[in-house]
Image (cartoon, rainbow, N blue to C red):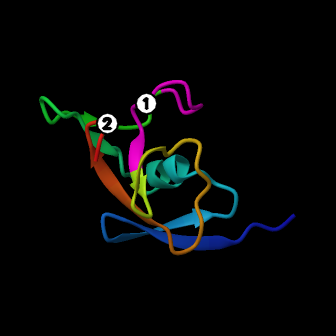
Amino acid sequence: MSQSNLEFTFDDQTITAISGQSIGAALLAANQRSLRKTRFNNNDRGLFCGIGVCFDCLVIVDGISNQRACLIEAKPGMKVQKQVGSDA
């Protein structure tokens, strides 16, 4: 089974992912550690559990907020953005 690369954007930066890879895994591989900010103290949050149990990796995907980066498969042309709090 061959793997192919694809590209999506994260806050207007081009990120390369491997077909089948989650957004969270691709961002981690691209050294993007901060995926969202907390609403009260503006603290950085990123991947924590990596399996969809927590909500630290919430991002905005193609305009839809509250998407867990660890569960969403990266697709070509996706527009992913950092989220502030749990409501963007």
Residue at mark 2 to residue at mark 1: CA–CA distance = 9 Å
User: With respect to residue 86, does 17 lie above or below?
Assistant: below
Q: Dot 2: what SS?
A: loop
Give the numbered dot on residue 55.
Answer: 1
Give the side of residue 7 with respect to residue 4, left or right. left
Near-viewer residue (65 or 21) = 65
The quarter holding residue 58 reads top left
Q: For the image shown, how many numbered marks are present on the structure?
A: 2
Image spot of residue 33 (x, y percent)? 35, 44
Image spot of residue 32 (x, y percent)? 36, 51
Q: Which residue is drawn at 68% across and 64% down?
A: 19
| Contact (Cβ within 8 Å) of mark 2 with mark 1 | yes
Q: Give the range drawn in magenta.
A: 49-59
Near-viewer residue (38 or 33) = 38
Give the side of residue 10 with respect to residue 71, left or right. left
Q: Upstream in the sequence, badge 2 or badge 1?
A: 1
Q: Residue at x 59, y 72 (%)?
A: 6
Give the numbered dot on residue 45.
Answer: none
Image spot of residue 45 (x, y percent)? 31, 35
Residue 34 visible, this angle: no
Give the side of residue 4 with respect to residue 48, left or right. right
User: With respect to residue 88, does 13 lie above or below?
Assistant: below
Provide the residue designation for mark 2.
Answer: 86
Q: Which of marks 2 and 1 is in front?
A: 2
Give the main secondary structure of the magenta stretch.
Answer: loop
Give the side of residue 4 with respect to residue 63, left or right. right
Q: Residue at x 49, y 68 (%)?
A: 78
Q: Dot 1: what SS?
A: loop
Report if residue 2 lies within the magenta region.
no
| Kind of residue indicated by mark 1 | Phe
Q: Residue at x 46, y 48 (%)?
A: 28
